[in-house]
């Protein structure tokens, strides 16, 4: 497949590489606008308290302070991804619900003055009882954090298909286990920052975000402004991982300050604020029950999963559902019952994550290993037996049109020498496998689709205008590569205008794994229409049928006689003379069931397609200390037909580091609502010295709907590398590890507990 393309499927240098490695790329905190003010935010010192009064008079009298905003300056609009989850005003009005919640914002001539002003704001609080454990929060009599959520249950997702109880009754083996995982930080290298500039009735904003159009709509609602007057502008983004998917309180604070002063305002969060006052990752507790036949066929699955949702809804229904969906997309479930509860607590707000559902996914995979052992099967064999295949439907009725789990498992196992190594692993050494699938584009209403505009300049170069967002993974470069393939123009001669709500059309953003499958499909269609226009005029000029013409290296050439050619720029200029310049639009929306809803109707085609992946990890465990060392991970990922092989390999490698190595160290630690490790000194992230040998394996399945057969590139690894490490540790120790991450203290306690049980 690769040979039929000139540039698709090749490793090319990303279009943004030079500016980033030389330091010339500008991020939000780098922006400097004339007359710009600096903002700081006063935050709640209580996990739960009623606001009795806010006095800002002394702060306003401080020389250099230009404005102060509080919840009284808002319209009281509550934000939430769905109407039934709208509960967050972004600036506290009646109560504060977590330590670090935004209470007031100050704009001053410099940061020092703004910080001084915060000390002059007097807030009278009435402390209220707080609850930090989601299971405690669900009990009768627990402090109620929001009146509209009885027992603090923010979302309950119930999915049931088949006859689960009957299937358990005829199972030959049933196992039930409970696993839990601490929440994590997104640990993006770029702390959150916002620049807002209000003038002439228009609000311009720059901030790290994964979906400009989604962000603009949310802010327009919060500010009660017409959508066309809220313009989210393009900016480089230093990391995402799910953290920049939704509107942030800092966006509203900065916007209000700019509107009030009529001047640009910049807010840059400290590393500690970034950890406490922006979205972090759900803690999860998952009880998993599985029934199988003697041959390893899964007959029944039952899940009860509790998610610590923090103080507000955020992406509640989605976050409560995704761990289950990525698992049912990988394995064949005929009888399944899932109950997911997202519970409100007095902790910081939570959001989506690239390796969301850690306890759920690790628990399922480790339990599968235990069942395979009890049945006398190889863990790979039980996965192959139950792995979903092309042409099959998931439990909630999504058709699989490409890929399947079999090929990633086989290729990962072969590269990792699974069958050779697994029987020879000695005491303290293990090899484990983790599998998962991921949806490419899920229902987001009319924002599920993408549109692109392309124009050919009079010199034969091109500009593409697309809503595609690049949060670090190379999406801009990918769009240029697709345009280059269709138009026959070198990548260096194609400009991309993107992620700017003033000039681009709707796009899902770097969300729901849609950039390649949805966004680049729109780019491809727009460029194909431009190509058709060029070839129609060229056919007249060259007296050659259009079907015998093609575009290569800035030229229109005859396929049957390459000696007959014409510079593309001649055709473009002719089009200008005719009053029909070469310009085209293209759009794509995935074939999904738009009646599907996360809570009320969780059935129907969820995504246009699905990617599949399998990771195999090797570990060495020091039984004296509990420390885990990861020497090697092989990660096989089905991305359809890769657009840029080097970019896909980079995503696989990054996913291994974030999820695989992160499995042994990353966690948020709490005490009475206070985050104890809000910086990179106490919050442990993988360093160069922690890196295993990584072998990325690209599995090609050529998706029939994807642009040039492509689909998402890397997220399956981010979700299954964690499981692979956990399963490898399980084999190395011969004990079930039920609490994540697998830090030395947890592993050591599990070893000691196993000794006592055995003794």
Image (spheres, rainbow, N blue to C red):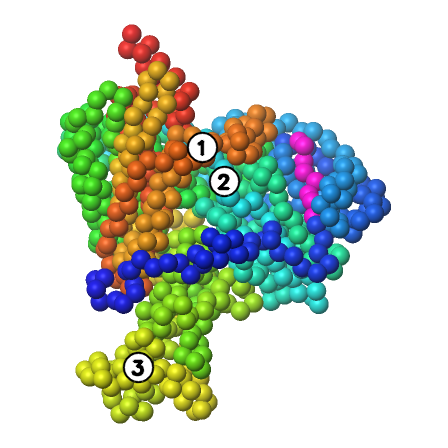
Q: Are marks 3 and 2 in contact (CB under 8 Å)?
A: no
Spatial distance from mark 3 to mark 1, Cα to Cα? 54 Å
Is residue 44 rendered magenta in the image? yes
- Residue 652 image offset from top left, x and y in percent: 33, 46
Name the foreground residue: 351 vs 532. Answer: 532
Left or right placement of residue 410 versus residue 709 in this view: left
| Residue highlighted by disc 3 | 556
Q: Residue furthest front?
A: 22
Name the foreground residue: 507 vs 327. Answer: 507
The residue sitting at 69% across, 48% down in the picture is 39
- Residue 556 image offset from top left, x and y in percent: 30, 82
Q: How many other residues sit within 10 Å of disc 3, few (<14), some (14-19) or many (≥20)?
A: many
Q: Are marks 3 and 1 in contact (CB under 8 Å)?
A: no
Which secondary structure, mark 2? Answer: loop
Q: Earlier in the sequence, mark 3 or mark 1?
A: 3
Q: Earlier in the sequence, mark 2 or mark 1?
A: 2
Range covered by the magenta-colored residues: 39-46
Q: Identify whether 248 is placed above or below 380.
A: below
The residue sitting at 44% across, 82% down in the picture is 458
* Residue 198: quarter of image: bottom right
The residue sitting at 53% across, 56% down in the picture is 24
Q: Are marks 2 and 1 in contact (CB under 8 Å)?
A: yes
Dominant SS in magenta: strand
| Residue highlighted by disc 2 | 187
- Residue 485 image offset from top left, x and y in percent: 32, 69
Q: Identify whether 36 is placed above or below 624.
A: below
């Amino acid at each position: 497949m690769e040979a039929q393309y000139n540039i698709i499927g090749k490793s090319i240098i990303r279009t943004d590489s030079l500016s980033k490695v030389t330091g010339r790329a500008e991020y939000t905190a780098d922006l400097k606008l004339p007359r710009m003010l600096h903002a700081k935010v006063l935050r709640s010192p209580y996990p739960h308290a009623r606001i009795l009064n806010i006095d800002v008079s002394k702060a306003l009298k401080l020389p250099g302070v230009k404005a102060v905003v509080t919840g009284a300056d808002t319209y009281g609009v509550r934000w939430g991804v769905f109407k039934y989850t709208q509960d967050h005003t972004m600036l506290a009005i009646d109560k504060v619900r977590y330590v670090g919640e935004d209470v007031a914002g100050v704009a001053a001539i410099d940061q020092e003055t703004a910080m001084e002003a915060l000390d002059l704001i007097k807030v009278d609080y009435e402390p209220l009882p707080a609850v930090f454990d989601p299971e405690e929060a669900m009990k009768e009599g627990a402090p109620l954090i929001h009146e509209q959520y009885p027992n603090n249950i923010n979302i309950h997702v119930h999915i049931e298909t088949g006859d689960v109880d009957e299937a358990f009754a005829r199972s030959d083996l049933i196992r039930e286990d409970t696993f839990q995982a601490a929440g994590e930080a997104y640990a993006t290298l770029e702390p959150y920052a916002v620049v807002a500039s209000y003038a002439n009735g228009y609000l311009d904003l720059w901030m790290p975000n994964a979906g400009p159009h989604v962000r603009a709509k949310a802010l327009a609602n919060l500010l009660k402004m017409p959508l066309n007057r809220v313009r989210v502008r393009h900016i480089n983004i230093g990391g995402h991982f799910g953290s920049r998917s939704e509107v942030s309180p800092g966006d509203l604070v900065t916007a209000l300050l700019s509107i009030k002063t009529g001047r640009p305002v910049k807010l840059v969060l400290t590393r500690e604020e970034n950890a406490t006052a922006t979205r972090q990752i759900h803690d999860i507790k998952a009880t998993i029950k599985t029934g199988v036949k003697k041959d390893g066929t899964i007959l029944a699955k039952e899940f009860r999963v509790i998610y610590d949702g923090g103080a507000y809804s955020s992406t509640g229904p989605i976050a409560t559902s995704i761990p289950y969906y990525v698992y049912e997309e990988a394995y064949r479930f005929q009888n399944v019952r899932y109950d997911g509860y997202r519970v409100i607590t007095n902790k910081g707000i939570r959001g989506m994550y690239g390796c969301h559902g850690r306890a759920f996914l690790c628990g399922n995979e480790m339990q599968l290993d235990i069942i395979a052992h009890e049945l006398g099967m190889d863990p790979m064999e039980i996965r192959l037996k139950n792995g979903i295949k092309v042409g099959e439907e998931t439990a909630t009725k999504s058709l699989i049109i490409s890929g399947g789990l079999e090929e990633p498992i086989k290729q990962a196992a072969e590269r990792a020498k699974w069958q050779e190594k697994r029987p020879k692993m000695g005491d303290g050494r293990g090899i484990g496998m983790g599998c998962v699938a991921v949806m490419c584009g899920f229902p987001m209403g009319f924002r599920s689709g993408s549109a692109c505009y392309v124009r050919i300049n009079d010199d034969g170069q091109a500009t593409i205008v697309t809503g595609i967002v690049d949060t670090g993974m190379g999406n801009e470069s990918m769009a240029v590569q697709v345009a280059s393939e269709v138009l026959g123009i070198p990548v260096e001669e194609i400009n991309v205008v993107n992620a700017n709500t003033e000039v681009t059309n709707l796009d899902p953003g770097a969300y729901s794994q849609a950039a390649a499958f949805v966004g680049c499909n729109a780019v491809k269609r727009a460029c194909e229409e431009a190509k058709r226009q060029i070839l129609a005029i060229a056919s007249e000029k060259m007296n050659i049928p259009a079907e015998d013409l093609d575009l290569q290296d800035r030229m229109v050439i005859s396929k049957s006689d390459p000696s007959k050619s014409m510079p593309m720029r001649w055709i473009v200029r002719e089009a200008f003379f005719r009053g029909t310049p070469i310009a085209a639009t293209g759009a794509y929306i995935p074939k999904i069931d738009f009646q599907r809803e996360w809570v009320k109707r969780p059935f129907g085609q969820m995504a246009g397609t699905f990617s599949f992946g399998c990771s195999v990890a090797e570990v060495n465990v020091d039984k004296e200390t509990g420390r885990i060392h990861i020497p090697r991970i092989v990660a096989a990922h089905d991305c359809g037909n890769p657009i840029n092989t080097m970019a896909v390999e980079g995503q696989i490698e990054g996913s291994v580091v974030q999820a695989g190595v992160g499995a042994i160290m990353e966690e948020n630690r709490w005490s009475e609502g206070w985050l104890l490790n809000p910086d990179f000194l106490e919050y442990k992230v993988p360093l160069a010295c922690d890196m295993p040998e990584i072998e990325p394996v690209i599995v090609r399945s050529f998706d029939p709907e994807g642009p040039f057969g492509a689909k998402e590139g890397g997220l399956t690894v981010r979700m299954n590398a964690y499981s692979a490490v956990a399963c490898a540790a399980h084999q190395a120790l011969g004990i079930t590890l039920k609490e994540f991450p697998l830090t030395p203290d947890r592993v050591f306690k599990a070893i000691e507990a196993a000794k006592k049980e055995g003794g």
